[in-house]
Amino acid sequence: MTIFEKIIHREIPAKIVHETDDFIAFHDANPQAPVHVLIVPKRAIPRIGETSEADAELLGRMLLASKEIARKLSVFESGYRLVINHGPDAGESVPHLHIHLLGQRQLQWPPG
C-alpha cells in the first residue's frame, strides 16, 4: 500500500483541499512551491504510462478539477503548473499516478 492509499483510507493525515468519489487532492508533505497540491485517483494506477482508454474520463475530471483547486488556492490568476512524472528519471517517488499542482512562485523553464 502506497502512502497515497494510506491517505485515501485516512490512515495518514493530510490537508485535503478537494475530494470526489474518484480522486482526492491534498497538500504535498514536501512542497516544492508555496502551493503544492497532489491530485490523486482513489483507484491505484501505478503511473500515467500504465493508463488505458478506460481511464480517460477519470484523467479528464482530474485535469478539469485542477482549475477549481487553483482558484480555491488563489493561484488561478497568477498562474500554476501541472506536472505528471513517469518513472525514476522523471522524479517519480510514489508509484501511484498523481498530478502535481504548483504555484505562488515564479517557476523556471525548463524544469529540473
Image (spheres, rainbow, N blue to C red):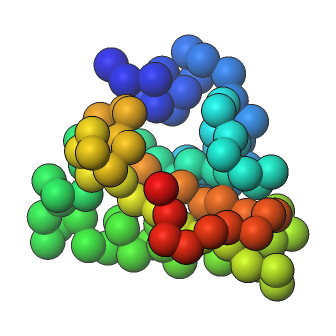
Q: Is residue 20 left or right of residue 69?
A: left
Q: Quadrant of residue 107?
A: bottom right
Residue found 27% across the figure and 39% down from its top: 88
Residue found 39% across the figure and 75% down from its top: 60
Q: Residue furthest right?
A: 74
Q: Is residue 55 left or right of residue 32?
A: left
Image coords of residue 81 (percent x, y)? 60, 70
Image coords of residue 98 (percent x, y)? 42, 50
Q: Residue furthest top?
A: 11
Q: From what the image shows, is residue 27 above or below residue 105?
A: above
Check the picture and name the quadrant holding the N terminus.
top left
Asked if one can make out residue 12 in the rendered structure from this viewpoint, the answer is yes
Q: Nearer the viewer, residue 9 or 94?
A: 94
Residue found 56% across the figure and 49% down from its top: 38
Q: Nearer the viewer, residue 9 or 89?
A: 89
Q: Nearer the viewer, residue 111 or 56?
A: 111
Asked if one can make out residue 43 in the rendered structure from this viewpoint, the answer is no
Image coords of residue 72 (percent x, y)? 81, 66
Q: From what the image shows, is residue 65 above or below residue 39?
A: below
